Amino acid sequence: MKTSDLFVKALENEGVEYIFGIPGEENLDFLDSLQGSSIKLVLTRHEQAAGFMAATYGRLTGKPGVCLSTLGPGATNFVTCAAYAQLGAMPMIMLAGQKPIRKSKQGRFQIVDIVGLMKPITKYSEQIVDGNNVTSMVREAFRVAMEERPGAAYLELPEDIAEEDTDATIFDVVGHRRPNAEGICIDQAVAMIEEAKLPLLLIGAGANRKRTGEALKSFVDKTGIYFFNTQLGKGVIDERHAQFIGTAALSNHDYLHCAIDRADLIINVGHDVIEKPPFFMEKDGKKVIHINFFAAQIDDVYFPQLNVVGDISNSINQIEKKIKPTKDKDFSFFQRVRDEVDSHITKYFEDERFPMLPQRLVNILRKNLDAKDIVTLDNGVYKIWFARNYKCYEPNTMLLDNALATMGAGLPSAMMAKQLNPDQKVVSINGDGGFMMNSQEIETAVRMGLDLVVIILNDSAYGMIKWKQEGVGFNNFGLDFNNPDFVKYAESFGAIGHRPESHDDFEKMLSSALNSKGVHIIDLPIDYSLNHSILNVLIKESACIV
Ligand SMILES: Cc1ncc(C[n+]2csc(CCOP(=O)(O)OP(=O)(O)O)c2C)c(N)n1
Ligand SMILES: [Mg+2]
């Protein structure tokens, strides 16, 4: 069989449903082999968007998403999404072409050592140098990308290898059960929790990857232990739960840090140092139990005293079975912090000013979306408001990136979320800076026939950096820009553009957009004037007077 035909069969064998990307002349054999395959090719308008879509596929399904590019310039466009998938623990496979490796008449034209380039930002980066290896290399790339901690893999198929014949055969997909933690570790964890006066549970990214919500909910219900989450751990347990304190969108000095500071033990489930720290550990400070699929990576701000390594749900179930219900612990302080956090985050929920405060936007969205509907975020200062103030009711209903924290992934991740969840409403929140980094994909979204609501928070600036600039006392300089007319821009792609002029306007537009077909783009003027006074000043001054 021709190697490129077998390559496609090997991908089908892995259950691949989509390939996102942009073929080049070096992929033409592969493209030809894709005809008649069950795999759907989705063309994008930039390789970066294809990579973000593939990574989001991996994030939401646990199976690697696949993207395709040509050699050189196409493959270098994958660099940011490789880092996105790798840091965010999203299984993703990048496929690229390459010039013939045996004999080429094009000198070094377009040739870049992509395998070398990808090595530090992937788990696996290889060139296929013989058609007979294609099936084992595909299997290996998928195995490595999927296994905890999941991440990116890169596989390169040179033109001459793609067209040669091979008699290799397909390998069965053989999985394995995740190992469980040892009883000794479980006993140590139980003892530490029972001895602690004020234990607090932290839920991080790993808990969202493997649906550990049920185990964790019965643990908090049995023990009465209060919990908070990281940005990537949002929604693992319904955030309306009576023992939920809040989301750590900042590393210190927020209201919920009163609880973290007072706790003498943090039971950390699924968080690792790739995420912006939800708190800082200090020598001789509180103790931390690290419960994850892998041991803790040590850092100045993170050096847990106990590792419980194994399947997270199983570890939690084992601990829950052995632990005695807590009668001697007084959680009333955590309850007070919880009440304080709640009154603080809801304070501007009905604020009347227009342009609108981000807090009001959070409230309007929460009221208009059902439990399973999905909000995706690009990166900008609004991410802090959404992480802190928007309550998730279900796992993975707020897709944000708190690992690479790149701009430009918001729209592609929303498109993927909608494709995978056609019955759920999906709203994509973007800054005017981040939106423009991949706005060409509106064409892809329209072509895919997606029903999507895209909101652009218009402050004509890189607002996040303005907020940081103000925070350190520098002059306002170098961060303002002009925007296109987003309504006309939307219409030029065949999308539907909206520009509200009041709250009522916005709510009406949002509700009609959510309930109608097509890609809706709402150009929403945003008021960031309280970012500094609340996030830099107020919470530092008042947070710990609970
Ligand atoms: C690709 C990339 N470039 C730069 C940054 C640094 N950065 C983080 S947020 C931000 C500004 C975001 O501006 P915008 O999208 O308009 O959102 P806003 O904060 O104004 O709401 C920048 C430049 C980044 N995270 N990613
Ligand atoms: Mg902006």
Image (tube, rainbow, N blue to C red):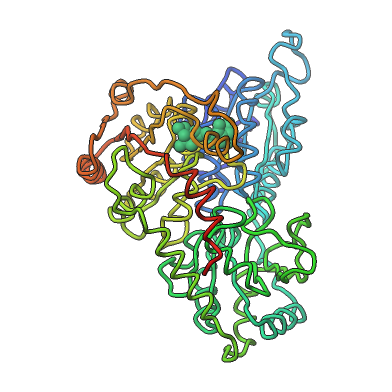
Residue 401 horizontal/vertical position (percent): 55, 46
The residue shown at (50%, 73%) is 214
Question: Can residue 22 be seen by looking at this rendering?
Answer: yes
Query: In the rendered image, which quarter is residue 358 located in?
Result: top left
Residue 235 shown left or right of residue 182 in the figure: left
Q: How many marks?
A: 0
The percent position of residue 458, horizontal first and vertical second, equals 38, 32
Residue 37 appears anywhere in the view: no
Q: Quadrant of the N terminus?
A: top right
Q: Nearer the viewer, residue 174 or 219?
A: 219
Q: Is residue 379 left or right of residue 323?
A: left
Quarter of the image holding residue 113?
top right
From the top left corner, tell me how far across and down residue 339 is, in percent: 43, 70
Left or right relative to 213: residue 391: left
Q: Between 363 and 241, which is closer to the camera in this rendering?
A: 363
In percent of width and height, residue 523 lies at 32, 32
Question: Which residue is at the front of the view, 201 or 339?
Answer: 339
Q: Is residue 359 above or below residue 96?
A: below
Image point (72%, 84%), residue name:
191
Asked if residue 380 is positioned above or below residue 314 in the image, the reply reads above
Residue sitting at x 52%, y 55%: 539
